[in-house]
Amino acid sequence: MTTATAYSQLAQLFARLHRFSHLGAIAGWDQAAMMPPKGNDARAAAQAELGVLMHGLITDSKLPTLLSQAEQEDLSEMARANLGEMRREWRMANCLPSALVEAKTLASARCEHAWRSQRAANDWPGFLQNFREVVRLAREEGRLLGEQNGLSVYDAQMDKYEPGITSAQVERIFTEVKSWLPDLIAQVRDQQAKVPVPVPQGPFSVEKQRALGLEVMRLLGFDFDAGRLDVSLHPFCGGVPEDVRITTRYREDDFVQSLMGIVHETGHARYEQNLPRDWLEQPVGRARSMGIHESQSLSFEMQLGRSRGFLQLIAPLIQRQFGPDPALSADNLALLYTRVQPGLIRVDADELCYPAHIILRFEIERALMNGDIEAEDVPALWDEKMQSYLGLDTRGNYRDGCLQDIHWTDSFGYFPSYTLGAMCAAQYFACLRSSTPDLDRQIAAGNLQPVFDWLGNHIWRQGSRWSTDELLRRATGESLNPAHYRAHLEARYLA
Amino acid sequence: MTTATAYSQLAQLFARLHRFSHLGAIAGWDQAAMMPPKGNDARAAAQAELGVLMHGLITDSKLPTLLSQAEQEDLSEMARANLGEMRREWRMANCLPSALVEAKTLASARCEHAWRSQRAANDWPGFLQNFREVVRLAREEGRLLGEQNGLSVYDAQMDKYEPGITSAQVERIFTEVKSWLPDLIAQVRDQQAKVPVPVPQGPFSVEKQRALGLEVMRLLGFDFDAGRLDVSLHPFCGGVPEDVRITTRYREDDFVQSLMGIVHETGHARYEQNLPRDWLEQPVGRARSMGIHESQSLSFEMQLGRSRGFLQLIAPLIQRQFGPDPALSADNLALLYTRVQPGLIRVDADELCYPAHIILRFEIERALMNGDIEAEDVPALWDEKMQSYLGLDTRGNYRDGCLQDIHWTDSFGYFPSYTLGAMCAAQYFACLRSSTPDLDRQIAAGNLQPVFDWLGNHIWRQGSRWSTDELLRRATGESLNPAHYRAHLEARYLA
């Protein structure tokens, strides 16, 4: 019997972690989509126990030696990339003292639990009491994470979701966007004010919406032998790569948002369903980053889903469910799905206003993490930026202002991923359109294969083999270039 | 800081095991009720990893010392009972070498997997090839388990499901049953031949059956804030005590079996939902045994569910879903639910023929485990006993004979629990009727509280505090007495 290499011992450990996280992922999906309320305490205890177990495995004292030894071993290119991802995970788990991890978990749970009622009650002062501690602990976490790789507190937080990116890069990109976005919004609104858009009249039964959603998922290549569609309060894509669980929610008075939500989650799902099969149990087999994940959902939702060709393709399916209403024509669907209307709520925002919501959050959370502002300064900054970017008054309306998102009860640095993802998606499709000039005609004819092939070859099956930047350069020939995003928005909204 | 007692260290370990088993239980339910087919391999790997983890925890070398030390500590009565259950679990896990556990798991998985197609193909010789190894390993397991507490191979297997019972006791009981059962069946069939029973005509939509099932579960006190009803190929009661998941399956041409199946699983569920809340994370907080578990489902299905009063209560609910068909009257439902018709399949058997199926299996599996027969002798014995107990010819029909159950691909000694449970249920209700003489009138009037109170006080909230025998004696004033079972059957079927 030969001695196992350090690398193979590590691979075995990470496979174990993958299997344990499988159970946590299914239990997490169940909690959101299936679990009755009284199951909550026992589920939380079970998940916490699993968390302790997995933390114990990844902080095992043998790991530093194994990682160093493995780096000296003769490894394939994939194995070496895998080893890099292992070290990244090890570093993130090991630079935090468990007392901090525990304190942060508790503070976040308390803050989130209270937020559920405080948001409804518009109770910013109440929220602030818990939020101060969450901010304090997140700064401490960011400081410790940052010490490891020379990053600022906020950059270290962002690095958890988008490894390798810096806030200087993001600021450069967002500053550029701010230079043209408000004008573009104003111009588009001006144009659209002249065009009335008939709104489809419900009720749209949940049953028919579900049937339509399933049909569209099939069209989008979702593998129902390896996943499901269910309902939860907040739609998400969960489960495991081998068995992807997406959720939606239905409103009987409107199917438009829910349907596009399903398209969005199906984008996440196809990424997961097509990660490199031979590497699924290893870190290198996972999705590259949250930004790249969002770039898949937004490729589906924004690039493909709201394209004229796709709406032509699905209009007959919609009409088959809800009748031959002219408000359900492809032409009118295109108007509905590109309607621009600044509003207070991020998750309800249209494609054009969405980045304004993100830039605002990025600027506030960065200042907060880096200590330029304190927790109590958030509402005033929020009011000022909503006025400046979207022309909306949010003073005193915390519920629809800085209390609207769940993110800050637990994490900072995630928000940029949404807009970075939207930019990547625009860049992919610019590339795809140049190699497939008749793309929109093919989509309208029901041939979505060129989209699936491009994303599958360039993104899905690459897992975490390369850094985000290298993945982008290999896929599109250049690093992230927001010019494609601007061009996409102008082409769609000023046409 | 005081040093933790040995008992409290054990309690902490068993709480961890409980939390891990929570994840396994939910993942197991999901596998049967929700999971798409391609999720299977990853799920199996995750469950196996969890099994290895839990086996490692319960075979930790510190346990023997902790158990002995705790036995010297000053403990409450509940804690002492808990310690006894801990030792039992420890003994069962520790007397088996892991090579045997692994070999058994593999052989069972292989046998079960092949059985799925072999049963349909009526392929006994094919099955036999895998079955021999399953039998060999189960004998070895039983021998090792039995060495620990001086039991025969078969008694050691039975002890896993019904601690404390011996095959000598079971044989005494079953021999007595065999002395009157065939005659009783013949007599009842004779009587029933004169009474035509109109069969309700479908189709019965799945939606309506589900609505009816939920309504009946509500009537039976199922707590929907702590559990769910879903669909699976083989109905079961799973999940965790804090969140009980029962399943059923529907046939559009018949609602009668599915409805009573829901009543059955609800009996299991209420036991779980009412185990002692303060002890749920500990072994003493669990259900006493499989026989006692079946006694709860059969209390609901056979004693309560098929009683005249209950059928009067639910007939209007049934008619509200399926219309005012006279075949759906309480009188006709009573005829339907007491129809006796010997058949080949255990799970389809009526109340009166069911014990014959069990006695046959008990006699065969005991002989097999104790080495009195070999695997290849099973079909001939099966044929002989089916002829003798139910007058049916099964020669050459393995599919509906010895290949019909999944149990023997994995376990021996479970079958008696079904009939022991039916006997316990009859004994409970004899007791309950003598303290509540107008029980049936109360049930018909919709007051099921006396049933819930009796079972709750005497069984549910006792967990594993006492042995099965002591539980029965405290509840009913006597040890298991099959006379109540006979009296129940005669009262119901010869009335």
Image: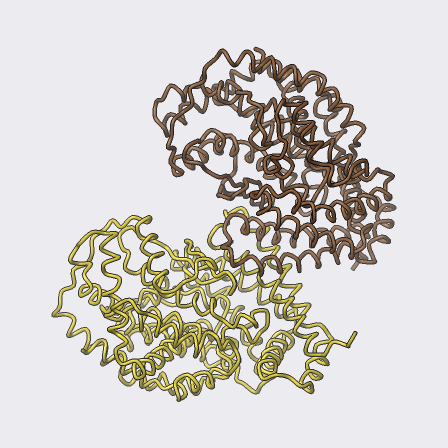
Chain colours: A yellow, B brown
Residue A83 screen position, x and y as percent: 62, 80
Q: Foreground: A452 or A491? A: A452
Residue B286 screen position, x and y as percent: 68, 41
What quarter of the picture does the N terminus of chain B occupy? bottom right
Q: Is residue B62 above or below residue B375?
A: below
- In the displayed structure, does residue B31 sit left or right of residue B321? right
Q: Is residue A367 above or below residue B171?
A: below
Whether residue A62 can be seen here: yes
Q: Is residue A31 above or below residue B332?
A: below
Q: Foreground: A433 or A396? A: A433
Identity of the residue drawn at 45% across and 80% down = A367
Q: Foreground: B335 or A396? A: B335
- In the displayed structure, does residue B228 sit left or right of residue B65? left
- In the displayed structure, does residue B248 sit left or right of residue B367? left
Outermost residue toward the left in this view: A194
- Rendered image quadrant of residue B235: top right
| Figure disc tally | 0
Residue A289 screen position, x and y as percent: 48, 76
Residue B52 screen position, x and y as percent: 71, 58
Whether residue B420 can be seen here: no
- Rendered image quadrant of residue A233: bottom left
What quarter of the picture does the C terminus of chain B occupy? top right
Q: Is residue B125 above or below residue B382?
A: below
Identity of the residue drawn at 73% across and 53% down = B12
- In the displayed structure, does residue B195 sit left or right of residue B41? left
- Rendered image quadrant of residue B340: top right
